[in-house]
Image: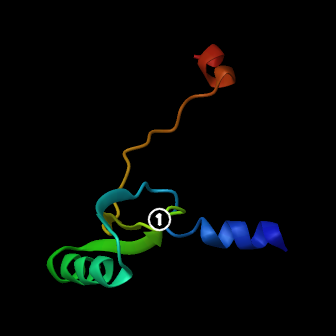
């Protein structure tokens, strides 16, 4: 069952993309207002995380999906045939 859930999570094209720390705040209200300002202006995903030291961090990442120009690599077997 867990394997099926992992495959469903990987269908999201942003899965695994890194988050960038934008802002730190001492209170959640301050971090939340910054998050709401960022959401109004940009096409990004924003979240607020609380660190173990009690500081709140506003994290962002791009919400646009970039298509990769990945080319299929030829296997060693195909290279030998050519």
Lateral position of residue 46 relative to residue 15, left or right: left
User: Residue 31 at x, y = what percent?
Assistant: 31, 76
User: Residue 52 at x, y = what percent?
Assistant: 54, 63
All told, the count of numbered labels is 1
Which residue is disc 1 drawn over? 13
Q: Quadrant of residue 61?
A: bottom left
User: Residue 41 at x, y = what percent?
Assistant: 14, 78
Q: Going by the picture, which residue comes out furthest to the left? A: 41
Taking depth in this image into account, of 27 and 73 the one nearest to the observer is 27
Q: Quadrant of the N terminus?
A: bottom right
Taking depth in this image into account, of 36 and 10 the one nearest to the observer is 36
Q: Which residue occupies 63% across, 24% down? A: 78
Mark 1 secondary-structure assignment:
loop
Colour treatment of the image: rainbow
Lateral position of residue 42 relative to residue 46, left or right: left
Q: Which residue occupies 23% across, 74% down? A: 43
Q: Quadrant of the C terminus?
A: top right
User: Residue 69 at x, y = what percent?
Assistant: 37, 45
> From the viewer's perspective, is residue 12 above or below residue 33?
above
Taking depth in this image into account, of 6 and 20 the one nearest to the observer is 20
> From the viewer's perspective, is residue 81 above or below residue 57?
above
Q: Which residue occupies 43% across, 54% down? A: 18
């Amino acid at each position: 069952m867990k394997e099926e859930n992992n495959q469903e999570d990987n269908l999201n094209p942003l899965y695994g993309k890194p988050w960038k720390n934008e802002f730190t705040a001492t209170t959640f209200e301050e971090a939340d207002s910054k998050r709401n300002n960022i959401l109004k202006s940009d096409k990004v995903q924003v979240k607020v995380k609380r660190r173990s030291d009690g500081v709140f961090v506003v994290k962002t990442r791009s919400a646009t999906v970039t298509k990769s120009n990945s080319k299929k690599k030829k296997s060693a077997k195909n290279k030998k045939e050519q």
